[in-house]
Image (cartoon, helix red, strand yellow):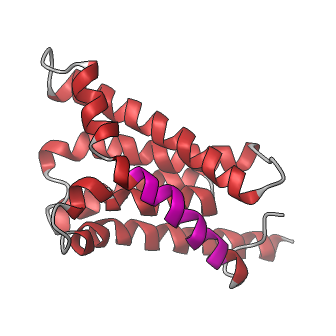
Amino acid sequence: MENSRRNDNIRSMTFAALCTALCPVMPLMAGLIPNGRQFLSPMHIPPLLCGLVTGPVYGAAAGLLGPLLGALTVGTPPMAKLPQMMTELCCYGLVTGLMMKFVRTGKLRTDLWLSMVTAMVVGRIAGGLVTGLIMLKGEYSVKLWAGAYFAGTAPGIVIHLLLIPVIYFALERSGLIPRRY
């Protein structure tokens, strides 16, 4: 039993490290598409997936460290946006992990969508609060926040909700992660 738990921990740690390393890579790939970084929100995918697969602790760590790694290695996100990106993506990993731990509808796709939608709302609220409180004191409004965090990233939200479950199902079918149901 202890060996199994240790192996699960090593597997989770390895997956979280992979997701953290993908955070700087995803925007580079999306940069090949005109405005791809802006409307696809590619750096959001690894922390969302990490939380779903590994749970809240490793998901939060990937969400916190991924943008920092990206900023230090490839300059994405820019340092000016780093605090809100770290906050938002940390929330993504944490909330998807918590939701997957406590929500069990009996349907995997429903569990995944509930987890991701909740995480996206919480993460965007947290990122908006950091932007409003720290970055743009007195110049930030609900209208600016909604435009930046929802309207401007709507294509990315839809792509995440469609793509991440496909990846999760593929990982499950391949035996790389245990079956949920």
State whether residue 62 appears in this view: no
Residue 20 lies in the magenta stretch: no
Comparing 6 with 20, the one in front is 20
Most common secondary structure along the magenta stretch: helix
Q: Which residues are magenta?
A: 157-171
Quarter where residue 65 is shown: bottom left
- Horizontally, residue 172 falls left or right of residue 150, namely right
Q: Is residue 127 above or below residue 74?
A: above
- Horizontally, residue 171 falls left or right of residue 2, namely left
Taking the spot 21% from the left edge, 27% from the top edge, the residue there is: 144
- Residue 123: x, y in percent? 43, 38
Comparing 163 with 98, the one in front is 163
- Residue 13: x, y in percent? 55, 69
- Horizontally, residue 169 falls left or right of residue 120, namely right
Taking the spot 24% from the left edge, 63% from the top edge, the residue there is: 70
State whether residue 50 appears in this view: yes
Q: Residue furthest top?
A: 138
- Residue 162: x, y in percent? 52, 61
Quadrant where the N terminus is found in the figure: bottom right
Q: Residue furthest bottom?
A: 174
- Residue 129: x, y in percent? 32, 26
Taking the spot 12% from the left edge, 19% from the top edge, the residue there is: 139
Quadrant where the C terminus is found in the figure: bottom right
Taking the spot 14% from the left edge, 62% from the top edge, the residue there is: 75
> How many numbered discs?
0
Comparing 14 with 136, the one in front is 136
